């Protein structure tokens, strides 16, 4: 039977319903409480570290996000660690949960197609993550203004908004991964475990796997400088398979204006950086474009895999 109407009929309804369910769920409240507490702790520690440099640093608000005070890491480090958990928590039962509750056939009997259902669940989760990130950023900015007595500059606002975009793309990758596992595995517990396993591999072990793989793919001759550089480049390319690596590189470049390169750094590239000359925002944006494109491409590819898997599944009443 041929479908009538647009394949995205009901998309807005599904997305808003998913977002409302996430915003009122105890699971989301617990995750956001964890992020809020860690964010406040890291920002409070950063404020204590940077108060003495208010008159010297032109990017004082960016330092709020990147400055760490022992034993707490920086806010960016916390966010890179916890954003995947939010993405996994929001979508690990997005599709298989409907099967478990036996509501899938009932939903699809309405004028809602599979395309709109899957896209609505993804966009609903992405909307919730975006709201949470903007709220956190406004909270940090407000704390900075109150504690430091200085407003952020225009360039700091642009860099902060770009950082939010990178963070949203990073969280979107893990949201798509969790949604993919939700379509592959019938059990929500199995889907959640698969997402957490992949997160642990990329977070804890990928930094060790990449150089080992590079040494096997491109062995280096200790007497040949070019072979050593080639091995380092191969290792970096393998490391960038991980969304965590792309996120870390992009945040370093956009929040630290002195960063001039995200690859191998040679002496001539550091000449102006040593003199303390930061890059303008446009140059930093060009610098992180490959990383941001990689995150967006990974999100699209994984979502497409989830879409194809979901379209091929048989749904019985």
Image (spheres, rainbow, N blue to C red):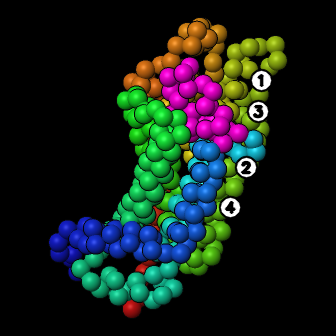
Label 1 belongs to which residue?
Answer: 220
- The span picked out in magenta is 45-69
| Secondary element at tag 3 | helix
Disc nearer the start of the sequence (2/1)? 2
The local secondary structure at tag 1 comes to: loop
Q: Which numbered mark, 4 or 3, is in the foreground of this view?
A: 4
Mark 1 vs mark 4, CA separation in Å: 32 Å
Residue that badge 4 annotates: 197
The residue positioned farthest toward the left in the image shown: 5
For the residues marked 1 and 3, what is the alpha-carbon distance in whole angstroms?
A: 7 Å
Measured in 3D between alpha carbons, the distance from the residue under mark 2 to the one under mark 1, in whole angstroms, is: 25 Å
User: Label 4: few (<14), some or many (≥20) within 10 Å?
Assistant: few
Residue under numbered circle 2: 204
Q: Earlier in the sequence, mark 4 or mark 3?
A: 4
Answer few, some or many: residues within 10 Å of disc 3's Cα (few below 14, many 20 plus, some between 14 and 19).
Answer: some
* Residue 248 x, y percent position in the rendering: 59, 39
The residue that appears at 58% across and 68% down in the rendered structure is 30
Reading the chain from its start, which is encountered first: label 4 or label 2?
Answer: 4
Marks 4/2: CA–CA distance: 10 Å
Residue 78 spot, x, y in % from top left: 63, 49
Residue bearing the label numbered 3: 215
Judge by depth and name the residue closer to the eye, 81 or 310. Answer: 81
């Amino acid at each position: 039977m041929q479908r009538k109407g647009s394949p995205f009929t009901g998309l807005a309804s599904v997305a808003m319903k998913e977002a409302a369910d996430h915003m009122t769920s105890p699971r989301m409240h617990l995750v956001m409480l964890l992020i809020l507490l860690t964010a406040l702790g890291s920002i409070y520690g950063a404020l204590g570290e940077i108060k003495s440099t208010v008159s010297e640093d032109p990017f004082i608000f960016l330092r709020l996000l990147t400055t760490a005070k022992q034993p707490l890491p920086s806010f960016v480090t916390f966010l890179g660690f916890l954003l995947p958990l939010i993405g996994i928590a929001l979508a690990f039962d997005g599709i298989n949960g409907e099967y478990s509750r036996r509501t899938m056939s009932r939903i699809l009997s309405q004028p809602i197609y599979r395309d709109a259902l899957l896209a609505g669940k993804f966009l609903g989760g992405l909307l919730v993550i975006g709201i949470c990130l903007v709220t956190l950023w406004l909270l940090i900015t407000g704390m900075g203004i109150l504690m430091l007595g200085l407003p952020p500059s225009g360039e700091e606002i642009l860099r902060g908004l770009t950082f939010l975009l990178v963070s949203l793309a990073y969280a979107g990758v893990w949201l798509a991964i969790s949604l993919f596992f939700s379509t592959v595995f019938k059990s929500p517990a199995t889907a959640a475990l698969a997402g957490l396993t992949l997160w642990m591999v990329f977070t804890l072990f990928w930094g060790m796997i990449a150089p080992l793989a590079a040494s096997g793919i491109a062995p280096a001759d200790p007497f040949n400088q070019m072979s050593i550089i080639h091995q380092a480049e191969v290792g970096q390319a393998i490391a960038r398979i991980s969304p965590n690596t792309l996120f870390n590189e992009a945040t370093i470049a956009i929040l630290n204006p002195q960063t001039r390169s995200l690859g191998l750094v040679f002496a001539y590239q550091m000449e102006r950086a040593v003199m303390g000359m930061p890059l303008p925002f446009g140059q930093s944006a060009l610098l992180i474009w490959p990383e941001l494109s990689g995150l967006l491409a990974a999100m699209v590819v994984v979502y497409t895999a989830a879409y194809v898997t979901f379209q091929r599944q048989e749904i019985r009443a």
